């Protein structure tokens, strides 16, 4: 069902791309991603992959990216976006070595993307839980982390009709959630690899102020 919905979503985006310049950029950008990976990924380097849906999620992942760049300079950073509002603003972000869109979450795209990118670790920011990508990462024994995530009982993961999709949460190596309520909710469903770390955007604002 999930893959059918993703295919329908991709078709809807294609149709909408004929009427919206913003959506057209996303559609074209996602189809350019594999070319960008082929041209820019260095086969001799190790990559840590950060995925942010848009600009707000990017800001939440930014403190961690900068810390990794400073403390682990042997790693390169791959940064992906889903929305043009993130990619167009941050495609030249200097701390990232490769920046591109994330192709739609189909089994084929996930396999192609992971094969081309070869990340050592993956960090998904806030609400980003793409089932096929997570499954392929786990299959290749690549750790997946969720950063600045937040959970509520009414989210699809915890509904009877979303349990298949919610299974991907059990694939995450560790959750760094924003609040105690999120930790309690995950614990209720048997997910205990959780740390309450707060909203990383606040740390960013504090660092700028200091």
Image (cartoon, grey):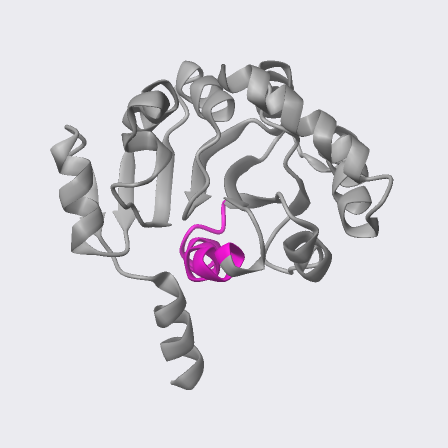
Check residue 63 for magenta coloring: yes
Which residue is painted at 55% across and 47% down in the image? 53
Q: Nearer the viewer, residue 35 or 26?
A: 26
The answer to whether residue 179 is left or right of residue 126 is: left
Q: Give the magenta range.
A: 57-74
The quadrant where residue 127 appears = top left
Circle count: 0
Residue 59 placement (x, y as % from top left): 50, 62
The quadrant where residue 163 appears = top left
Residue 143 placement (x, y as % from top left): 37, 29
Q: Nearer the viewer, residue 112 or 108?
A: 108
The answer to whether residue 114 is left or right of residue 173 is: right
In the displayed structure, 131 sits above or below 183; it is above
Residue 203 placement (x, y as % from top left): 35, 70
The quadrant where residue 101 appears = top right
Look at the image and tell me whether residue 197 can be seen: yes
Q: Residue furthest bottom?
A: 209
In the displayed structure, 117 sits above or below 198; it is above
Which residue is painted at 66% across and 44% down in the image? 98
Check residue 72 for magenta coloring: yes
Residue 125 placement (x, y as % from top left): 44, 47
Q: Nearer the viewer, residue 42 or 171?
A: 171
């Amino acid at each position: 069902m999930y893959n059918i919905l993703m295919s329908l979503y991709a078709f809807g985006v294609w149709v909408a791309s004929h009427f919206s310049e913003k959506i057209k950029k996303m559609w074209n950008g996602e189809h350019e991603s594999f070319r960008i990976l082929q041209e820019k990924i260095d086969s001799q380097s190790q990559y840590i992959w950060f995925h942010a849906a848009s600009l707000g999620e990017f800001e939440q992942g930014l403190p961690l990216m900068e810390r990794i760049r400073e403390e682990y300079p042997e790693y390169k950073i791959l940064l992906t976006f889903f929305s043009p509002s993130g990619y167009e603003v941050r495609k030249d972000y200097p701390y990232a070595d490769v920046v591109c869109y994330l192709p739609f979450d189909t089994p084929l795209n996930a396999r192609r993307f992971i094969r081309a990118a070869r990340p050592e670790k993956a960090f998904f920011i806030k609400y980003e839980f793409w089932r096929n990508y997570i499954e392929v990462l786990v299959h290749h024994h690549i750790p997946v982390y969720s950063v600045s995530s937040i959970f509520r009982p009414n989210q699809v993961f915890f509904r009877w009709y979303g349990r298949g999709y919610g299974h991907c949460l059990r694939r995450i190596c560790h959750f760094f959630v924003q609040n105690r309520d999120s930790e309690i909710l995950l614990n209720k469903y048997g997910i205990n690899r959780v740390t309450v770390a707060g909203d990383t955007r606040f740390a960013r604002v504090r660092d700028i102020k200091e």
